[in-house]
C-alpha cells in the first residue's frame, strides 16, 4: 500500500513542476526565448559581377618552330669551332670551319682552266669574223667554257661546305667536337632550335569543335615553372577528328620570354573559347546534395535555402546562372548543418577562412 502512495506523490510533484513551468512561460516571454536554439553565427557575401571565361583544358608537348641537326657534308679536319651550348646565334653566323685548303686549290685549278677556255673562245670568235675558223670549232669552244663554268660552281659549293653556318637564328645545342678532330662526312655536329616562340601540340574533345578557331587565346602552365603563366594563341586546327579518342589535334604558339621553356617539355594548356559578364559567388558557399546545388541566403535574421544552377568556375569563385540576384546575401561560413528557417547572426569578417570541402564537387 505504501508503494502506491509513493508513486502517487511523485506524480503530483512532477505535475506541479510542469504547471509552474507553463505559468512562467505564459507570464515571461523572455523565458521562452531562452529555451530556443541560439542563433547560428555566419558570414555573408553579396554576389558580384565579374568577367567569366568558358574554357577547355588539355595537355601537350612543346616543339621548336624550326629545329635542325647540323651535319658535316664533307670530310675534313676541324680548324675552328664557334659552338657555345645554349648561346644564341644569328642567321649566317659561322659555327664550324673545316680544313678547306684542298678545296681552295681545286678551285684555283678550275678557275685557271676556265680563264684559258674563255681566251680560246674569244680568239676563235675573232677569227670567225674573217672566216678563218669553222663554226663547229667555235661551238665546241663555247661548250668547253660552259663546262668549266659549271665545274667552278661545283668547286665553290664544295669549298662552302667546309663552313657550316647557322641557317636561321636560334639557340645552339650540345656538341662533343674539338678543334683538330677529323670529321667524316655525315657526322652530327650540333643542333639548332628557334625557341623565341614554341609550338604546343595537343588535342581538344570534338564537342568543342564549333567553338574553335585560329586566334583564340591560350594560357600555358609548365610544371617546371608552376608560378608562371605563358601566353599564346591557337594557330592551327587539324583536319581530322581521331576516331578512337574523339579529339581534334590543334597547335598553339606559346611565347617563350627569356628562353625558359625547352622543346619536348610537357605543358598544360587552357583555351579560352569566349568571355562574358556574369554573376559570381565564393565557391565555398555552394552546397551539394546528390545532383542538386544550393546555397543559403540571409533574410531578416533567418536562413533560407535556395537551389541554384552553376556555370563556369574560376579560382575560388563559381558562376551562378539561375537562382540568385545581386542583392541576395549568400552565407559563406557556418552553413554546414544549417537548416532553412533557422535563426542566424551575421557578422562582418573580411578574413573569413574559405571552406574548400565542396570545391571539387562541381567539377565536370
Image (cartoon, rainbow, N blue to C red):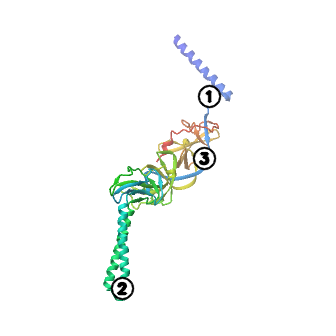
Which image quadrant is residue 24 in?
top right
**Residue corresponding to mark 3:** 47
Residue 112: x and y, percent? Answer: 36, 71
Q: Residue at x 52, y 52 (%)?
A: 257
Q: Earlier in the sequence, mark 1 or mark 2?
A: 1
Q: Residue at x 37, y 81 (%)?
A: 123
User: Helix, strand or loop at disc 2?
Assistant: helix
User: Helix, strand or loop at disc 3?
Assistant: loop
Is residue 234 or residue 191 the one in the foreground?
191
In screen coordinates, is 348 left or right of 236? right
Which image quadrant is residue 345 in?
top right
Residue 43: x and y, percent? Answer: 61, 38
Q: Earlier in the sequence, mark 1 or mark 3?
A: 1
Q: Does the rendering let one see residue 28?
A: yes
Q: Nearer the viewer, mark 3 or mark 2?
A: 2
Q: Are marks 1 and 2 in contact (CB under 8 Å)?
A: no
**Residue corresponding to mark 2:** 127
Q: CA distance from mark 3 to mark 2?
A: 102 Å
Amino acid at each position: 500500500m505504501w508503494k502506491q502512495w509513493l508513486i502517487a506523490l511523485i506524480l503530483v510533484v512532477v505535475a506541479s513542476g510542469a504547471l509552474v513551468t507553463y505559468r512562467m512561460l505564459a507570464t515571461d516571454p523572455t523565458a521562452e526565448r531562452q529555451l530556443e536554439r541560439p542563433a547560428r553565427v555566419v558570414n555573408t557575401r553579396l554576389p558580384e559581377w565579374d568577367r567569366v571565361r568558358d574554357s577547355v583544358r588539355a595537355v601537350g608537348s612543346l616543339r621548336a618552330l624550326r629545329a635542325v641537326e647540323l651535319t658535316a657534308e664533307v670530310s675534313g679536319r676541324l680548324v675552328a669551332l664557334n659552338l657555345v651550348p645554349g648561346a644564341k646565334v644569328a642567321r649566317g653566323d659561322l659555327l664550324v670551319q673545316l680544313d678547306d685548303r684542298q678545296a681552295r686549290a681545286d678551285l684555283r685549278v678550275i678557275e685557271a682552266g676556265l680563264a684559258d677556255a674563255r681566251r680560246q673562245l674569244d680568239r676563235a670568235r675573232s677569227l670567225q669574223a674573217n672566216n678563218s675558223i669553222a663554226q663547229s670549232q667555235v661551238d665546241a669552244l663555247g661548250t668547253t667554257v660552259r663546262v668549266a663554268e659549271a665545274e667552278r660552281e661545283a668547286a665553290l659549293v664544295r669549298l662552302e661546305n667546309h663552313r657550316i653556318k647557322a641557317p636561321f637564328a636560334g639557340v645552339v645545342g650540345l656538341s662533343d667536337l674539338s678543334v683538330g678532330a677529323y670529321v667524316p662526312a655525315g657526322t652530327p655536329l650540333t643542333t639548332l632550335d628557334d625557341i623565341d616562340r614554341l609550338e604546343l601540340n595537343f588535342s581538344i574533345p570534338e564537342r568543342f569543335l564549333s567553338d574553335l578557331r585560329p586566334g583564340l587565346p591560350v594560357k600555358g602552365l609548365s610544371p617546371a615553372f608552376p608560378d608562371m603563366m605563358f601566353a599564346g594563341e591557337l594557330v592551327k586546327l587539324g583536319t581530322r577528328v581521331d576516331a578512337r579518342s574523339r579529339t581534334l589535334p590543334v597547335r598553339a604558339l606559346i611565347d617563350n620570354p627569356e628562353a625558359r621553356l625547352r622543346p619536348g617539355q610537357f605543358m598544360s594548356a587552357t583555351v579560352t573559347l569566349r568571355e562574358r559578364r556574369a554573376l559570381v559567388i565564393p565557391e565555398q558557399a555552394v552546397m551539394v546534395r546528390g545532383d542538386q546545388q544550393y546555397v543559403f541566403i540571409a533574410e531578416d535574421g533567418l536562413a533560407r535555402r535556395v537551389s541554384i544552377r552553376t556555370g563556369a568556375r574560376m579560382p575560388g569563385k563559381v558562376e551562378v546562372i539561375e537562382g540568385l540576384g545581386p542583392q541576395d546575401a549568400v552565407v559563406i561560413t557556418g552553413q554546414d548543418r544549417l537548416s532553412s528557417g533557422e535563426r542566424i547572426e551575421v557578422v562582418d569578417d573580411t578574413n573569413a577562412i574559405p571552406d574548400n570541402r565542396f570545391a571539387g564537387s562541381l567539377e565536370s
